[in-house]
Image (cartoon, grey):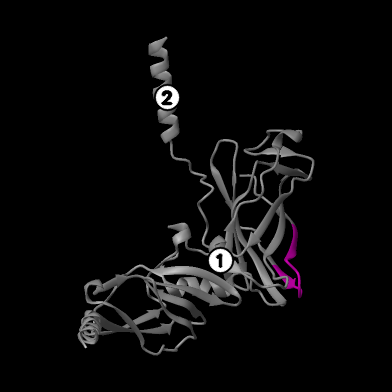
Amino acid sequence: MKTLTILIVSCFLLTSCMEEGKIKIQNKVHNTKLENISFGDVSVYYSLLPGETSTEVTVSDYKESFPKINQLEFYMVSNGNKVYLKTKNKYILDYGETLLITISDTTEVINPLIE
Amino acid sequence: MRKLSFVFMIVLFIVGCKKEDYSPYSYSNESTIYSDSKTTQFREFVIIIEPYIMLGNEKKYIVTDTIKNINIKISNKLWGIYNSFGIDTSIFIKEKTTNFYLTNTITKYSIIAPYKTSNDTLKTAGEYSDLLNNYLTLEPGNYICQIESFVIKQIDGTIKKIKPFIVVPVEVKENTRSALVGEFEVQINNN
């Protein structure tokens, strides 16, 4: 009985330390797909057509690791050509929040190969 | 001897710190694009320019190491700005009767012209989208090629800007990597 109580309390403590934030990505870049989109070490979405918005992706982690501050990384794909880019800005995701990131024609990006 | 070693070490250190302009790890925007297409895609135009001057009734061809800033438009859109391949000017028998070195042999300046972005540094997702959509992607068909201008260095070091009136149709065929626009003799005014 004592063991069971310890186990339940431990589980409760562990669960209570975890928090969640949500991310949505919107692609507003003309004629171009965004693929393999990631926010830090979290893979957010595989592929977004122009005009498409992703479903909410939940990021779970320990409370202490929030807020997460990262650039968005993705491949831009068009006509069979592909380039790896990062956003210049960093985005902040805090727990309990839903972060909507819109990538549009005017979004400033960095190409790590020519940085 | 010790002093000499010290000076040598300092020189070595300074040379070692010199920043190279031609780093093998510097890339153009175009070279960061990856394509996994298995088919042959159109990539570049090939052009030859032969500049000459009329001396009396005789054509004399200009000898210079390279022609620069060749501005090319395809169907009225800027395709890129290029330099010709360098040539070995020592192989020509030259005369210096004008502000150019001249020869009786035809001098051919070759240009390979893949699509180039007008911006050296792309900053936005929209600019990269334009690059991806234009890179390697002229569909088979007929286009108008226009060589708007180029510059040649004269003997006294000044630059002469030439505006040749070259407007020609060019065909991009299916499954070809390049298209020959043509060889063009361009008369340069001798003044």
Give the vertical position of B48 relative to B91 (above or below): below
Please name whichever residue, B24 or B153, is drawn nearer the observer in this view of the structure. B24
Q: Which residues are magenta?
A: B168-183
Is residue B174 found inside the magenta-colored segment of the image? yes
Q: Amino acid at mark 1?
A: Ile
Q: CA distance from mark 1 to mark 2?
A: 40 Å
Q: Quadrant of the N terminus of chain A?
A: bottom left
Q: Residue at x 41, y 68 (%)?
A: A86
- Element type at mark 1: loop
Decide: is B51 above or below A4. above
Host chain of mark 2: B
Which type of secondary structure does the marked residue at label 2 adopt?
A: helix
Q: x%, y% of residue B17?
A: 41, 35
Tell me what residue is drawn at x 39 percent, y 79 percent. A103
Query: Circle 1 sits on which residue?
Result: B33
In the rendered image, the quadrant that contains the C terminus of chain A is: bottom left
Q: For mark 2, what is the residue?
A: B11
Residue drawn at point x = 76 percent, y = 33 percent: B93
Instruction: Give me the chain letter of mark 1.
Output: B
Residue B12 is left or right of residue B47, and the answer is left
- In depth, the one of A97 and B86 nearer the eye is A97
